[in-house]
Amino acid sequence: MAAPIPKKDDRGKESAALSSLIAAIGLTALKIVVGVATGSLGILAEAAHSGLDLVAAAMTFFAVRISGRPADSTHHYGHGKVENLSALAETGLLLLTCGWIVWEALHRLLSRKAEIEVTWWAFAVMVTSIVIDVSRSRVLARAAKEYNSQALEADALHFQTDVWSSAVVIFGLLCVKVGQGYPALDALRSADAVAALGVSGLVVWVSWSLGRRTVDALLDSAPAGLEERISAAVSVVPGVMNCHNIRVRYSGPVLFVDLHVLVDGQQTLQQAHELTETIEGVIQGIVPGADVTVHPEPY
């Protein structure tokens, strides 16, 4: 077998998760204070969303730390699945928050009793939120790509949608301000609650996308088309007469591949070993960092 590829230093991965956690703490606190002070359901909905982002960021941080532990006597494939479990928990939290947002928004639309104070603080906190979310989503996306981390990718996706949801809230606040200034356009004062419903729609979309990918990972679903690519690449390696029983599965960021190949039964053990190393190199060229096991069979 080929020597395993050295594992990347996880400090950059943990640093990205920690910076996201710190930013989530600050944003959540800011949105709660401004939301309560102004009475804006849109901002309070955003605060609740950011609160769940805070919980999600905390889970991601600890999941990233745990998943980086090496394989041991009780976890032969490492601890990568912790990232997938973290992402699944995030999905549940997002759906719960979405239900609360929809309930409160419909209540406000139907009762029409709440008065909203639109101040420059409300706009300032949402603009600040957008700036911070854009910055940290980019940092997380880069780290997710570099370390092939589903947990960091999920975090990045959360904060990308936060940018759009914050923009929706700003639009709602502007409509409320116009409705307050022009009585003929009083219907626009309900725009804050409508904006909150818009936020919930984004949350549902993110939850559905994240939930499907998380469940696929936990059920060891093979990446679409990867088996065919591996088979095609290995079958043309000189000395390989047939490639079959290919199995692929992710455990966190690491892809595990095992396969059987038919080779010349008259070759020496050293030659067979060198051939398996060549095959591993070919597969790792397709999926860098893959943990590959090749089982040679005599033809």
Image: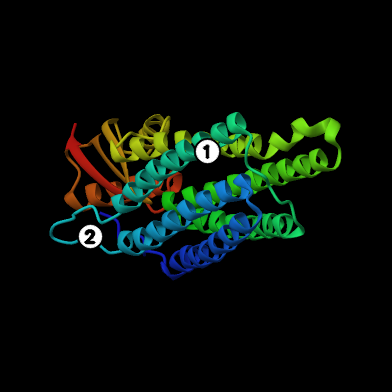
Name the residue located 45 percent from the left edge and 64 percent from the top edge: 13
Q: Nearer the viewer, residue 91 or 43?
A: 43
Mark 1 vs mark 2: in front: 1
Q: Nearer the viewer, residue 179 or 58?
A: 179
Q: Which mark is residue 250?
A: none
Asked if the residue at tag 2 contacts the one at tag 1, i.e. Cβ–Cβ closer than 8 Å, the answer is no
Asked if residue 124 is positioned above or below residue 161 in the image, the reply reads below
Name the residue located 38 percent from the left edge and 57 percent from the top edge: 59
Q: Which mark is residue 104?
A: 1
Q: Amino acid at mark 1?
A: Glu
Name the residue located 54 percent from the left edge and 33 percent from the top edge: 107
Image spot of residue 47 (x, y percent): 55, 53
Q: Is residue 201 visible to us here?
A: no
Q: Which residue is mark 2?
A: 71
Image spot of residue 135 (x, y percent): 64, 60
Image spot of residue 224 (x, y percent): 42, 30
Quadrant where the C terminus is found in the figure: top left
Per the model, the C-alpha gap separating discs 1 and 2 is 46 Å
